Structures are given as C-alpha cells and as structure tokens.
Image (tube, helix red, strand yellow):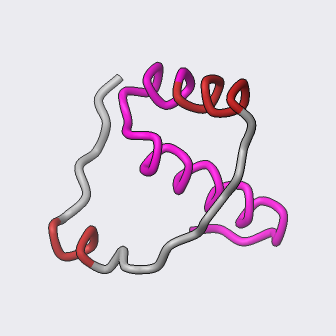
C-alpha cells in the first residue's frame, strides 16, 4: 500500500519532543511494527499516538 508523502512545510512544523521510556522488548516490538509499516519509528509512533488521542477524544482529523 502506498504511503502519502507529507509536504515539506508540514514536516518542518514538527519541533516539539516527547521523551518516552520503554523496555528493550517494547522497543523491539515498536521498531518491528514501524518497519512493517515502512515508516521510521518516530513517524509511526506519532501517527499511532495522534490517531489514538483523536479516537479517545471523539475527534476527527
């Protein structure tokens, strides 16, 4: 499945950081999921976290 590319200007807005501690097993699991989705771990985690936050808050894009 093809992944849509974000515009350069949208990517440049990503300036804030979240520090997250995980176990070695959790890291391996997350890296495997990101790799399977053909994304960097950072990109994959951001997408998953934002999607879940929106779901929990009942918000659409």
Residue 41, image x, y percentages = 46, 41
The answer to whether residue 7 is above or below residue 52 is: below
Viewer-side residue, 23 vs 51: 23
The answer to whether residue 58 is above or below residue 55 is: below
- Looking at the figure, which quarter contains the C terminus? bottom right
Residue 48, image x, y percentages = 61, 49
At x 56%, y 48%, the residue is 45
For the magenta stretch, what is the residue range? 32-61
- Which residue is outermost to the left? 8
Task: Using residue 23 as the reference point, say whether residue 38 is left or right of it.
Answer: left
Q: Quadrant of residue 58?
A: bottom right
Task: Using residue 8 as the reference point, say whether residue 1 is left or right of it.
Answer: right
The answer to whether residue 39 is above or below residue 33 is: below
Task: Using residue 52 as the reference point, say whether residue 13 is left or right of it.
Answer: left
Whether the magenta-drawn stretch holds residue 38 is answered as yes
At x 56%, y 25%, the residue is 33
At x 53%, y 56%, the residue is 46
Residue 13, image x, y percentages = 31, 80
The answer to whether residue 49 is above or below residue 25 is: below
Residue 19, image x, y percentages = 61, 65
């Amino acid at each position: 499945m093809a992944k849509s590319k974000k515009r350069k200007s949208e990517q440049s807005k990503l300036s804030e950081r979240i520090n997250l501690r995980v176990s070695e097993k959790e890291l391996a699991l997350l890296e495997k999921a990101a790799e399977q989705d053909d994304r960097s771990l950072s990109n994959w985690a951001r997408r998953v976290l934002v999607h879940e936050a929106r779901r929990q808050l009942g918000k659409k894009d």
